[in-house]
Amino acid sequence: MEQKKSTKMAAKLLQRLRPATLKEPQGPGPPEEPPEIAELVDDTEGISVRLSGTLSLSEDSLGSEESDGTDNNLVEELNQGTLLTQQLREMWSNSQRRTKPIKLTFEVTEANVVRDVHTKYVVYTIFVLQSGKFDPSPAYISCRYSDLERLKRRLRTLYPDEMSDVSFPRKRLHRNFTSETIAKRSRAFEQFLCHVSSMPSLRWSPHFVGFFYLKETQKAQQLTRTGLYNIALPLWTNIWRLQDKLCPLEPSTHRLLVLAGLVACHQEMDTLVEAQMYSEQAVGLLKEVMDANCPWLMPFLNAHIQLSWRVGKDKRDSEAALQKLQEAGHTTQNVPSLKEVLVRETVNLSV
């Protein structure tokens, strides 16, 4: 297929964007400037290489119907491993320009050219991982250049001071689908996201965290409403992993909604052990506030009691919490089910 053309040129470019000079500096001072800065400067407006991520593309993951003269005879096997954590930490610790620790790493793992009836665009798959250690549950997003640019404009409007030094690859009128452009943009997107996530005021911004999972949450919610639990479940699982990396552990509406989606889907698919596990996590978050006016509290308590009974787990704490609410004058009758609350809840940027 035309969209599955070989990407030998991208592989060759990747080797140039991953120089062998990235090693510990000899003696004091910042590490030697990698040669890729000269290649990135045209498209990235001077994004700091000290905030760089890594580009990992498979040979079939880039496609272009407009090769613009790309040499298809260049054959280079892409390295399937990641540079990532150790080199990033070394560059960061030795950098004298910035001292903000990077806790998240972003990797573009695929970039696919898509053509529909009216337009042609590139979809980038970006993995989100915890830095500094092995991440057993990486999460990912799929987005276009326009999605990331919209995020950049929104953050610059809301946080002009924090975003003043954050660069972004500019638009191009031509050669948008060459392997060279796609490879450079992929690297620049990693740098952009690493830079933004390194600043707490931006990292915890509803617009930043919402960018990663808001649309997917709405999609998963709609699939759950229509009973397509087997399709919705992988979405809920990935969203939960994204939230686990991006958001603080607190009983926010978004986290509780995702937990409700996980419980509802697992329960409908008769994987009750998993459903009970997620209901227990939700009850643990809710116990920190125990607000009877929270629409999630009683549905989660009821779900946890029922699921714990079915899988043989301890349910006494939830029963005691429900009893206290009853003694305080709150009705525990005709409480909507967890799925009913999930279906009617509105997803917005308020986290």
Image (cartoon, rainbow, N blue to C red):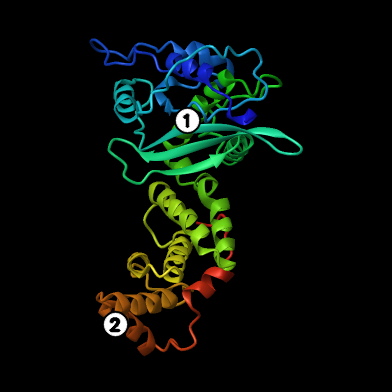
What amino acid is found at the position of numbered circle 1 in the picture?
Glu
Viewer-closest of 99 and 137:
137
The residue under the point 58% across, 56% down is 219
The residue shown at (33%, 66%) is 277
Tell me where residue 259 sits by quadrant. bottom left
**Residue furthest toward the front?**
1
Give x and y (percent) for residue 210: 53, 49
Split into 4 quadrants, where in the image is the N terminus?
A: top right
Q: Which residue in the structure is indicated by mark 1?
A: 190
Q: Is residue 131 visible?
A: yes
**Residue 102 in which image quadrant:** top left
**Tag 1: Cα neighbours inside 10 Å, few (<14), some, or many (≥20)?**
many
Q: Tell which circle, 1 or 2, labels the residue nearer the N-terminal end.
A: 1
Tell me where residue 20 appears, x and y as whole percent. Answer: 34, 13
Q: Residues within 10 Å of mark 2 (few under 14, many from 20)?
A: few
Q: Is 187 rendered above or below residue 71? A: below
Q: Is residue 226 above or below residue 205?
A: below
Residue 14 drawn above or below residue 203: above
Front tag of 1 and 2 = 1
Foreground residue, 7 or 149?
A: 7
Q: Which residue matches tag 2? A: 320
Dot 1: element: helix
Q: Position of residue 50 (x, y in %)?
A: 40, 22
Location of residue 251 in the rendering, given as x and y in whole percent from the top left corner: 41, 63
Q: Which mark is residue 110?
A: none
The type of residue carrying mark 2 is: Ala
Relative to residue 236, is residue 181 depicted above or below? above
Regarding mark 2 in the picture, which secondary structure is present there?
A: helix
